Image (tube, rainbow, N blue to C red):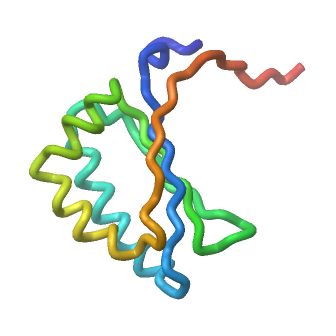
Amino acid sequence: MHAGTAGMILEVVTLDIREGQESAFERDFVTAAALIRQSPGHLGHELQRCVEKPNRYVFLARWTSIEAHTEGFRKSALYPEWRRLLHHYYLPTPTVEHYRLINEHPHSSD
């Protein structure tokens, strides 16, 4: 396990975006990403697009704790703007789950 990852929480969100809105979503996500980066306890994030279903994305955010996300970011003054920018693209409402690292296997060149 790398230093600093033991207590980290991974937020995993599968986002199905209204078909035809992918480019607009990606554009607005860039603006929204600047908001979440300002949130205390946010350690980083990534957005990945599905190859098989081009209107599906997975959002992975790393937090210092669940509370940093649920109590910190979601109850902050930043969250209403995040919602305004992104939530109208989702169909249906995404499921948000939090994960804690159990075991890590570093890449080996052997």
Residue 81 location, x and y as percent?
18, 63
**In the displayed structure, would residue 12 be above or below residue 107?**
below
Q: Residue at x 21, y 44 (%)?
A: 38
Q: Relative to 81, say whether 4 is above or below.
A: above
Q: Position of residue 53 (x, y in %)?
A: 68, 71
Q: How many marks?
A: 0
* Quadrant in the picture for the N terminus: top right
Is 100 located above or below residue 17 in the figure?
above
Query: Residue at the location (34% across, 29% down)?
Result: 66
In the picture shown, does residue 53 fall above or below 15? Answer: below
Residue 87 shown left or right of residue 1 in the figure:
left
Residue beneath the point at 64% across and 73% down:
54
Which residue ends up furthest to the right in the rendered image?
Answer: 110
Locate residue 86, reporting x and y percent: 33, 68
The quadrant of the rendering that contains the C terminus is top right
At x 27%, y 29%, the residue is 67
Where residue 2 sits: x, y (%)?
55, 15
Find the residue positioned furthest to the left: 77
42 sits to left or right of 73: right
Between 98 and 78, the residue placed more toward the observer is 98
Left or right, 93 with reference to 53: left
